[in-house]
Image (cartoon, rainbow, N blue to C red):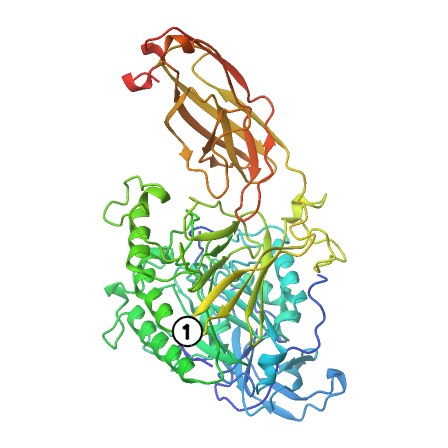
Amino acid sequence: MTDDDTTTTGGADTDEQDGGLSRRGMLRGSAALGAAPVIASAAGAAEAAPGDGPRGIHVAYGAEPSSTLAVAFTGAAGSATIRYGPSDGDPGTADLDTTATPSGRPVPGRDAVAYTATLTGLAADTEYAYEVELNGTTSERYAARTAPVGPEVAADGFTVAHVADHGVADPENPFQRPDDANPELAMALAERQDPVMQLLSGDISYSNGNPSTWDLYFETHEDYYAGTPFMTVPGNHEAEVGTGMIQYDRRLNAAMPVVDPVIDPVSKRRWWDVVYGNTFIMGLNTTADACGDLARAEEFVPLYDPRCETEAGRTYGELQEAYMRSALARAEAREDVKWKIVQFHGPLWTTSPDHEPRRDLQKRWGPIFDEYDVDLVLHGDNHVWERSKPIRHTEDLLTYSERRRPRDRPDEQAPPPAEAAADLDLPFEDADIGTTFVVNGTGGVSHYELGADELYIDTAFESFYGVTRLDIDDEAIEVRYIAHPPLDTVTDDDGSLPAGFDPSLDNPAVAVRDAFRIEKTDDGRPRQVDLELPDGSGSSPPELTVSGSRSDDGQAFTGGATNHVELAVDASAPVTVRDRVPAAWDVVGGDIRSPHGDEPATAPDGRQYVYLDVAGGDDDGVVEADYFVEAPADADETGAYSFGPVGAARRGRGADRDWTTVPGTGSTEYVVGSGADPAHDVRKGNP
């Protein structure tokens, strides 16, 4: 458990006592149930107290998951007690004959206290029942189980769930992000996997300065989090104006198994590690709130910024890096550890333009992951699903990344991926060895667009909400992305979670959208291997409906003249767009992207496909693009030429695209004779 330097108020007991708790047992079943932040200050007038009883109960593993756990909750200042004891499968009949007294810290902007107790000395692989009493009001009983020990853990295997960028719909918070039940959908999918722990890589409640949204978040998911250890790291939305990450620190970080909790009054340690069975799991922090302007998103305050210097004379990043090396070395020295998994918020390898790859950390942290053969790194931040190819942070790969977004020329147009890699030997081109990086920011708050077709990305989706399922045993880590379309695309209502919602794969809308496994080579290095998707996986989402328009400079052109083509497509889902252009016309500029994967360059009728880098979709789902083509100049090429129709396909990679024709987007252009017509030649300065 961690502590901070603000004193307790309102009579909360700050002494800690050892006690006991465990993993998941009996749950009530909550399955039945983005961008730089716009933030309100939590430092203003306090909101009403939450009442006398405990609220938002959640558990986390301690440093030794087989014998320790933490219980956390919020409530009014006063007297709190946790009663617990071993359960035989029925928490209601368990003898709760052991007690622990939580410590408490006040919650900024809220007349309430966040309580935490670290419970130790528990028996391995044992279910415990527990209840929490606060000011004479007692919660219902929950049950959880400690981790098992011994080689049979790896032999039997276990499941871990992961997601990021979650949130909760709070109509009382004008600064909140989600406004529907998609966050509940995502966590219902997670709970259905029956994991031994739930990882969440930052941007948790999207409180954005409103403390009551934190209360609502924990109440919404209390049944799940009270029985399944909830292991978190902060994201940029945990840094709030005026109070920094105090809400996160007192509600969540206080329950994490943080090593040496207090550095100084400014910079807190928000990193931790546990070993469960044969797997080392480490949480890191990519959000610096202790320096610079707290209103700025985390990517604008680098962890190694001199403004983030601590009293120890090192930057926050340097302190965390030293911890990271020490923790990975500990894991490497343990004979019982085979796998290494790391989670943090800001992604190293991503395509979405909403949050650029953390190129500073590619260079600082990437080689450390290589050195210690980290198997899997889990991120959030971008609201998409992305799976990287196996990554080794070679000089050529880092050079490629820098070319794609030059730091010293940030406003300069970056070369396309193929051009940036022209003279480089990228590590995944001839090997399947290296760390896999997964971005899963599809926790329900919103979707971002995918960016350029980066060479280091294997599979990507931007139109689902879902959970990463990790099945871990002695042979492999099997990873599956289990996801569902947004609720408003499959229901007739306003996006609420339907009564009796089925989060299992029996629901045709729930499917495994991506699947792979990580194995070890003989010398202990991670290898990524694709898994075949099960039959019916990726079952067809709702039919894509499209409409659109085309405009250009006219219908008659002299040879060599340039035509400016403008396209707009209104689609029921995020789409990528292509047009058909006569082979005799030259594409000379505009919103053009290179074909990726197996996308053909030539249409069946001999015309060329032009793939477009679309802008938008606005609130109406409209995307737009334009490009320039030059008419053939030879006299014998006079005649009529057909353009279009435009094709649209759901965005995403790793699966064959199903192209839909956009009606009303075909046209016929005529070329007459040779010679350029200045009225249609953009190269002479005419639009």
**Vertical side of 16 occupied by 219: above or below:** above
Q: Amino acid at mark 1?
A: Trp
Whether residue 527 is visible, yes or no, is yes
**Residue 131: where, in percent of width, then height?**
66, 82
Compared with 148, 342 (above or below) is above
Identity of the residue drawn at 38% across and 29% down: 590
Place of residue 317 in the rendered image (x, y in percent of width and height, measured from the top left): 31, 68
Residue at (38% x, 63% y) in the render = 287
- The reply, left or right, for residue 319 in relation to residue 344 is left
Q: Position of residue 479 (x, y in %)?
A: 56, 64
Residue 306 in the image: state x and y as whole percent: 23, 65
Q: Nearer the viewer, residue 341 or 94?
A: 341
Comparing 604 with 533, the one in front is 604
Q: Quadrant of residue 442?
A: bottom right
Q: Nearer the viewer, residue 667 or 221?
A: 667
Element under disc 1: loop
Residue 170: in sight, yes or no?
no
Q: Nearer the viewer, residue 225 or 649?
A: 649
Quarter of the image that includes the C terminus: top left
In percent of the image, x 51 and y 50: which residue is there? 460
Q: How many marks?
A: 1
Q: Which residue is mark 1?
A: 271
Q: Residue at x 67, y 93 (%)?
A: 97
Question: Neighbour class for label 1 at 10 Å: few (<14), some, many (≥20)?
Answer: many
